Image (tube, coloured by chain):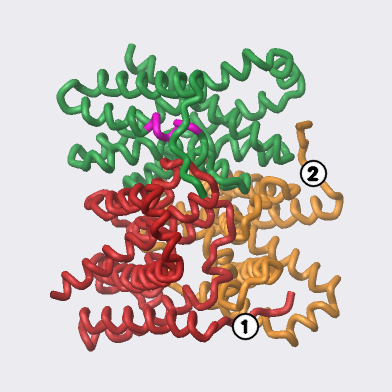
Chain colours: A orange, B red, C green
Amino acid sequence: MTDLLLFLFEFLGTVAFAVSGAVTGLSKRMDIFGILVLAVVVAVGGGLIRDLILGVTPPAVFRNPSYALLAACTAVIFCIPYVRSVLAKHRRSSDFLLLLMDTVGLASFTVVGIQAAYAVSADFSPFLLVFVGVITGVGGGVLRDVFAGEMPGIFVRQFYASAAIIGALLCVMLWSFAGEIPAMAVGMIVIILLRFLAEKYHWGLYRPEK
Amino acid sequence: MTDLLLFLFEFLGTVAFAVSGAVTGLSKRMDIFGILVLAVVVAVGGGLIRDLILGVTPPAVFRNPSYALLAACTAVIFCIPYVRSVLAKHRRSSDFLLLLMDTVGLASFTVVGIQAAYAVSADFSPFLLVFVGVITGVGGGVLRDVFAGEMPGIFVRQFYASAAIIGALLCVMLWSFAGEIPAMAVGMIVIILLRFLAEKYHWGLYRPEK
Amino acid sequence: MTDLLLFLFEFLGTVAFAVSGAVTGLSKRMDIFGILVLAVVVAVGGGLIRDLILGVTPPAVFRNPSYALLAACTAVIFCIPYVRSVLAKHRRSSDFLLLLMDTVGLASFTVVGIQAAYAVSADFSPFLLVFVGVITGVGGGVLRDVFAGEMPGIFVRQFYASAAIIGALLCVMLWSFAGEIPAMAVGMIVIILLRFLAEKYHWGLYRPEK
């Protein structure tokens, strides 16, 4: 049951991240191949950086390429003119759906990153666990922005990585005495809640004068 | 004989990639040091990323720095005013020569990347083998474009990475039953053929409306 | 005594690199979180890339997060309006102080990188040792510039990485017969001297015509 739920969340997150890559590729006038590659990079990039840091070789994405395939298929479907015209017609609902999926993706990738680090060693410092979780959640998006020639959104986007950090901290704190499943559940719920509250109430962080 | 041929192709590829880095550095008004570093990055970057993914430490470029040295020397020679004026005089032939060398480099680096992955383990998935081959072929160019502050050309350049992917797929498919040498030869020839046909007939991939 | 001195230099370097990240973040209108992350990336990025290349997992920054914390604290302090107004009032002294600290950071990070490589294996090639030292010194700054959407300064900034390379070469050459401490000391002093001379006399490298 928990496995199924986690799989569902990873599935949704992969699709959402792939769509965000495809949207960027379209706006940069890439061809279908560039769009497909960018979608796969966004979907699996965070986990790839995580595995390089943890010394997991070859990285998980190569041992189980199903998520990369899912991202590629998502990008192709997204580029079909008919699909894009349907999405354009229902812009408000599709924007909300995308935000929801992206948030679920950020949340699930972050806690899955922490789980992957625990699977390598139980002795990692909390600093590493939180960092590795957050990089799994935001890494794909950073690569997307660098490849699109833009400043990574996490540096300027309100309360995106901050939500991941708070959720990851809670998840790591709860892990040892509440157990894996409750820790991951709380971490995910907090990240999703924080991002939706931040979106609704336009939370922003202090931006110093230049 | 085969070793000699492969060495020759790697040699040509390294020189071509170094020149492409030097050309970019010149167009960005870098000083001689920046140009030299960029040339080395383009020439050895793909193999470096490959070895990080395969967990080969230290990466091959450090165990045998001769290709890095070759790239550095190429960049220095390329910056000599006399050499540049000669190249400028024979622009059409030198452009063709550069395209030829760049294509040979892409092709040889891609199949050498697959060979390097097989050398680490015979049990890698075809997905990893193809990916690692392609990243060896195109990785240096991606780093060059990111460092030059531009969107990586592979996302917009017609049929460049696509040719590498098709050649890598064929190479991996042939490897187990046709043997290493025929597989690498077919992979290389297909990549070179596809790129030249794409260049001649201006093949492009489907580019969706924004 | 030597350990204390090295610690002091690393401390100063970390603070200087964190400040350079914070300055960039401010100029790009990032919020406090983006500034903090960029400061940490600049301070620990070089060492992180070094450890990935050396196959040290998890990288040192995760086993001892005190430098990351120091960089984060530096960024937060730097963003306090009062601190910034004091720095703005004494612009000339603070510019000199920043240059001094940045130079000390470049020098100490470069030789510490070489030390870290020797700690992994005594059999590394001089090429690897020099490269790994220089990447430790300049890697953070490269990441800073890429994330800020700009061309890395080392490609155009007069005599920055060149100083690190010359110092690293001397350090590696002296290591085996003069011993660790003298080699590191000479390497650091040479890097600091070269950078100050380059700054004072506006040394630049040959910049070929486009």
Residue B168 is marked as: none
Amino acid bearing label 2: Gly
Helix, strand or loop status at disc 1: loop
Badge 1 crowding class, 10 Å Cα cut-off, few under 14, some 14 to 19, many 20 or more, is few
How many numbered marks appear? 2
> According to the image, label 2 marks what residue?
A204
Amino acid bearing label 1: Tyr
Q: Which of B38 and C41 is in front in this view?
A: B38
In the picture as drawn, the residue positioned furthest to the left comes out as: B1
Q: Which residue is drawn at 28% across and 38% down?
A: C129
Helix, strand or loop status at disc 2: loop
Q: Nearer the viewer, residue A175 or A146?
A: A146
Residue B78, image x and y in percent? 38, 52
Q: In which quarter of the image is residue C126?
A: top left
Q: Nearer the viewer, mark 1 or mark 2?
A: 1
**C76 shown above or below A4:** above
Q: Say whether residue B182 is left or right of residue C131.
A: left
Q: Which chain carries label 2?
A: A
Q: In which quarter of the image is the N terminus of chain C?
A: top left
Badge 2 crowding class, 10 Å Cα cut-off, few under 14, some 14 to 19, many 20 or more, is some
* Region rendered in magenta: C158-164
Residue B207, image x and y in percent? 65, 79
Q: Say whether residue A131 is left or right of residue A59.
A: right
Q: Say whether residue A203 is left or right of residue B67.
A: right
Residue C159 forms part of the magenta stretch: yes
> According to the image, label 1 marks what residue?
B206
